Image (cartoon, rainbow, N blue to C red):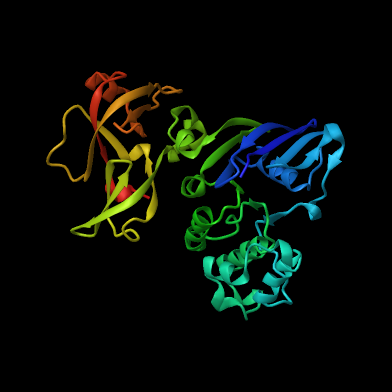
Amino acid sequence: MSDIYAKFCIRHESFVLDVNLTLPGAGITVLFGHSGSGKTTCLRSMAGLEQFEHSYFSVGDDIWQDSDRRLFVPTYQRPMGYVFQESGLFPHLSVKANLLFGKKRVPSSERRITLDAMTELLGIGHLLDRAPHQLSGGEKQRVAIARALLTSPRLLLMDEPLSALDVKRKQEILPYLEKLRSELSIPIIYVTHSVQELARLADHVVVFENGSILVSDTAQTVMSDPRFENVFGSEVGSIFDTTVAEYLDHNITRLDAGGVPILAPRVIGEKGDQYRCRILASDVSVCLDEPHGTSMLNRLPAKIADIRLPDVPNGHEILVLQFVNGLKLLANITVKSHHDLNLHTGMNVWCQIKSVALT
């Protein structure tokens, strides 16, 4: 699918939104930032729920808004799905009737997604006869997502769909969102302020700050860039898209990150499955020589690609470590460690990763 283009500009005394984006026409793009940074306003503009004087938005060859040509396609005419923070299910209808309500909006000749496919993908087949009040929060959101997808949209917009859920329900629904990314060809624009959701789901990341774009790039590039430590705080780290390679003794799974082996202390999926691995910079240490006699299972050779000095007194440094295949890993170290080990860019080192901390 062709790219998505978005240009929105509004200036009020209390708020400014000025974005100019080119987004991939596949996978999940996460709009990330603190509350009030402009990400939800941008999403609502894509949906046509906000209309600014200087705006442009297109999905592939379809132009939904072009203020220069005085073109504006109203929300109800845009072939898109929208999932809000609350499920918004009709309380007087069953789950199945809620799903069919979305499907009926689309002429039969334009329907590309079936009810059976959605109930299987989102695991809601056993809920069809229930009323919304009989569902958990996670189940309600899965039904809301299915209802949006049954409109056979060209674009799916999701506005913090997990923010109203507790931790247990979030963990319940995240695997289903990962399935959407891997099994559907529909581009998804996903708003969140959760680093965990970003790390689990994002193919592309747009970071908002005060109504402007701080960065727009692939998830791996953004998460492994030490310049954005202030954005992610204590959760700064790296992500790797891996393949489940084999199972070892004592419930250890060997993951393959493009030739770099990563050991995880549990059984993960089936052999050949794709698995996104997240490693926090605080869970990585550096050694000058290959470590022996250590409890850390992951001991890997790497090269120091960059060193970011602390922004504040008594802060820590961030090393950018690069593996032989080009993948990058962040590591937090103290200024004292930098001095004692005489670390410098281009130096070959060994890194240790806490296996029990892998997420």
Q: Nearer the viewer, residue 225 or 310?
A: 225
Image coordinates for residue 307, horizontal then vertical, percent:
36, 22
Whether residue 120 sits left or right of residue 310 in the image: it is right
- Residue 29 lies in quadrant: top right
At horizontal 77% and vertical 33% (from top left) the residue drawn is 14
The residue depicted at 52 percent of the width and 53 percent of the height is 181
Identify the residue shown where x is 65% and y is 78%: 131
Q: Position of residue 37 (x, y in %)?
A: 65, 37
Q: Is residue 157 above or below residue 288?
A: below
Tell me, yes or no, if residue 193 can be seen here: no
x, y (%) of residue 94? 68, 78
Name the outermost residue toward the bottom: 129
Residue 333 drawn at (x, y percent)? 32, 29
Q: Nearer the viewer, residue 38 or 245?
A: 245
- Dividing the picture into quadrants, the one containing residue 59 is top right
**Residue under the image location 43 percent in, 33 percent down:** 224
